[in-house]
Amino acid sequence: MPPAIRVESLWKCYSAGVRGCSARAWVLRGLTLSVESGEQVAIVGAPGSGKTTLAQCILGLRAPTAGRIEIVGAVEIIELQDVRRSGSQDRESRPPDIPTSIVFTRDPGLPSGWFDRLFLLRDGRLHARGLQSARRVAERSTALR
């Protein structure tokens, strides 16, 4: 079965500085992601790590500087502001059934049963992580800001 989402070598930069300056701020750097149909993936990152830019590129709201994005079938993009404040009493059950989803959040305290895979977005790249190591790294990243 082909992946529902395939992101290959995605690069995204923004112009930086004053008008006429050729400086660039690279947000995504050679990012690659493949999400299978029916899979639920979480992407955790500190504020300013590129989560929103990646979501906008996948949705077609921003054009990538380089790379390719391929979407097959229904995909849901979800942004969680803070899972702990959501008040959900059933934190260990999965979100509502949807064909394929990618959840973007800065909250490292995600319930482990919600996702098939978890990635940390840091320095413009995705790093596959187990829930415990992603929690430690994300907490350190947000503490530095």
Image (spheres, rainbow, N blue to C red):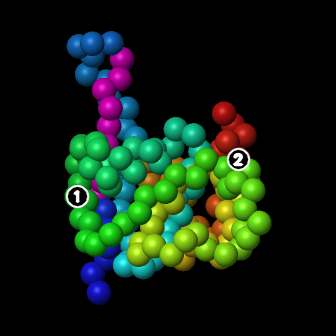
The front one of 136 and 99 is 99
| Amino acid bearing label 1 | Arg
- The reply to whether residue 123 is visible in this rendering is no
Secondary structure at badge 2 equals helix
User: Nearer the viewer's eye, disc 1 or disc 2?
Assistant: 1
Residue 105 drawn in magenta:
no
Alpha carbon separation for disc pair 1 and 2? 31 Å
Q: Position of residue 110 (x, y in %)?
A: 67, 63
Look at the magenta stretch and give its main secondary structure.
Answer: strand
Residue 60 is left or right of residue 48, and the answer is left
Q: Position of residue 60 (x, y in %)?
A: 26, 50
Q: Dot 2 surroundings within 10 Å: few (below 14), some, or many (20 or more)?
A: few
**Residue wearing tag 2:** 140
The quadrant where residue 26 appears: top left
> Considering only vertical position in the picture, is 51 above or below 42?
above
| Amino acid bearing label 2 | Arg
Residue drawn 52% across and 52% down? 79
In the image, which residues are magenta? Answer: 8-17
Q: Quadrant of the N terminus?
A: bottom left
Residue drawn 28% across and 42% down? 62
Q: Position of residue 61 (x, y in %)?
A: 29, 44
Q: Are marks 1 and 2 in contact (CB under 8 Å)?
A: no
Q: Quadrant of the C terminus?
A: top right
Query: Which label number is shown at residue 28?
Result: none
Mark 2 or mark 1, which is nearer the start of the sequence? 1
Residue drawn 24% across and 64% down? 70
Secondary structure at badge 1 equals strand
Labels in figure, total: 2
Q: Residue furthest bottom?
A: 1
**Residue wearing tag 1:** 68
Residue 104 is left or right of residue 11, and the answer is right
